[in-house]
Structures are given as structure tokens and as C-alpha cells.
Image (cartoon, rainbow, N blue to C red):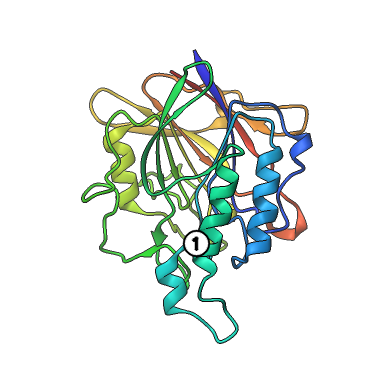
Amino acid sequence: MSIRLLILSDTHDSAFPDPGSLPTVDIVIHCGDLTMIGGLSNYRKALEALEKCPAQLKLVIPGNHDVSLDPEWWTKNLDEDDDPAEPQRAKELFESFARKGVKLLEEGTHQMSLQDGRTLNVYASPYTPDFNGYAFAYGEEEDRFNTGAHTVPLGTDVVVTHGPPFVPVTAYRMDQGKNGEHCGCSKLWTAIERTRPRLHCFGHIHQGYGSQVVRWDKTDGMTVEDVSATGSDDLDGRARSVPPTTEGTTVLVNAAIMADGGLNNKPWVVDVKL
């Protein structure tokens, strides 16, 4: 038994694929940066696109560019022509789409249930290391994922974050920016290593788009492999797919849709075995 997911991220107002072109799945997951700089009309456009996606559930977290979904950031950075009430109005807008199957996930753990009773344990967090002063940021020494109220728990099937982890092996490249520098979070990787979910999906670093598989061994070691080496294929040009998740592995997916040069990447389809 499995649950089929379609994963995308970093659509930034203009890069959301045509919902009618997407394959039918059980759950769509958007890993944040719906917009370029927030805005109620931009949120609505993204939510309407998510609503039209062919899936029972659509799950979304904010990204650092979805600034008015972070009330604390908004209050600290309010300009004269900004609406002080936009965070509350944005919250109400998202709540209105929850009745249509589009759910904004708060930081923490959620059990998502499909109509036939299949369930998925999902951990979600929009937070990333401080990045040019944008929203949902944490400091270099802060660990949101292994201590405190929002620790990633054992038994998590899917981890959804906006930012990538930093994986300390040469083969890993999904957090590398324009100049090849690693932008991922080592504390997030500690949480992935500790809990070993079936899937960790994220975006944020556009140049890191792709998928890799972590293979855990019984002595607490691991290897990282490109998905292309294990049979990635294309769903009639509509999305990229990875092999179904298996015991002893964690699939990593950077689903950033917006790419350089005016070309957009494709969403990813993953079958998560239960």
C-alpha cells in the first residue's frame, strides 16, 4: 500500500504549472515560496491553482518570500504603504481554502488521512537559516528540529521543509547555490539522520533542483545516490518521478519549480510506501 504525492516548491507567482496538465495523485505538497513578496492577490492565485490540482488533499507551507504569512516579520518590517492587517487577512484567506482541500500546515506534526483510510504522518516547517533578511528565519546556532516544541518525531513518514538540509558527503548537491556553496542546515540533517523518514521534500535553493536517495546501513553509515542511477522516469512530460520509497532509504527531493533562464522545472511524483 502506498500514497502517491506530487511535490513542488518555489513557484513565485509566475511559475505554477497548469493544474490541468498535472498527473492525478493522492496528495499535492507545496514546499513554500508561493509568491515573490507576499500579497493577498498573489496568495489567492496560488491557492486557486492548488485547488484545481487533481488530488484529494493539497498541503502547503510558507517560504521565506511569503513574508506576510510571518506576522512577526511583517510587524518588524512594515513600510508606510503596507497593510498592518495583511497577516490576519492572509490567514483568513488560507482558512477559506481549507474547506476546498487546501491546507496550510503550521510548524509541527500532522496526521493526514485520505478518504479510504490511508494515513501519512507529516512534519512541516517553513523556517530556514537567516537568508537576506526574509521571513521565517532562524539564527545559525538555533536548532528547531531536535529540541523544543517542534522537534521532528520518530515515526514521521514525510518531512516537508522550505529549506534543504546540509548532508556532509561529497555526492550531495541539493543545497548548492549559484556559486556551488552549500546553503543547507546541518541541524535539519541531524533530525533527518535521527528519524530517517521515507521522504524529505523541500525547495528554496533553485539551483539544487533534483532528487537523491540516502541509503542507511546498519552501522549508522549512509550513502547518497542520484535518482537517475536508480531509474528515474518522466510521466509523459508532466512531471518527474522517483522510484517508490523502500525500507532503509530516505528520498530527498528539491522541488523548486522556478529556474534560471526563464525555464521552469517539473514537479516530482513520489510513491510513499506505508
Res. 258 visible in picture:
no
- Image quarter where the C terminus lies is top left
Is the residue marked by circle 1 packed among few (<14), some (14-19), or many (20+) residues within 10 Å?
many
Q: Nearer the viewer, residue 219 or 124?
A: 124
x, y percent for residue 5: 57, 30
The correct choice, above or below, for 124 with respect to 43 in the image is above
Res. 135 visible in picture:
yes
Q: Nearer the viewer, residue 248 or 135?
A: 135
Q: In the rendered image, which quarter is residue 97 located in? A: top right
Q: In the rendered image, which quarter is residue 229 located in? A: top right
x, y percent for residue 139: 31, 66
The correct choice, above or below, for 25 with respect to 60 in the image is above
**Element at badge 1?**
helix
Q: Residue furthest top?
A: 1
Q: Residue at x 67, y 61 (%)?
A: 42
Q: Residue at x 47, y 23 (%)?
A: 245
Q: Is residue 13 left or right of residue 109?
A: right
Q: In the rendered image, which quarter is residue 228 located in? A: top right
Residue identified by numbered label 1 = 69
The correct choice, above or below, for 85 with respect to 240 in the image is below
x, y percent for residue 210: 58, 41
Q: Amino acid at mark 1?
A: Leu
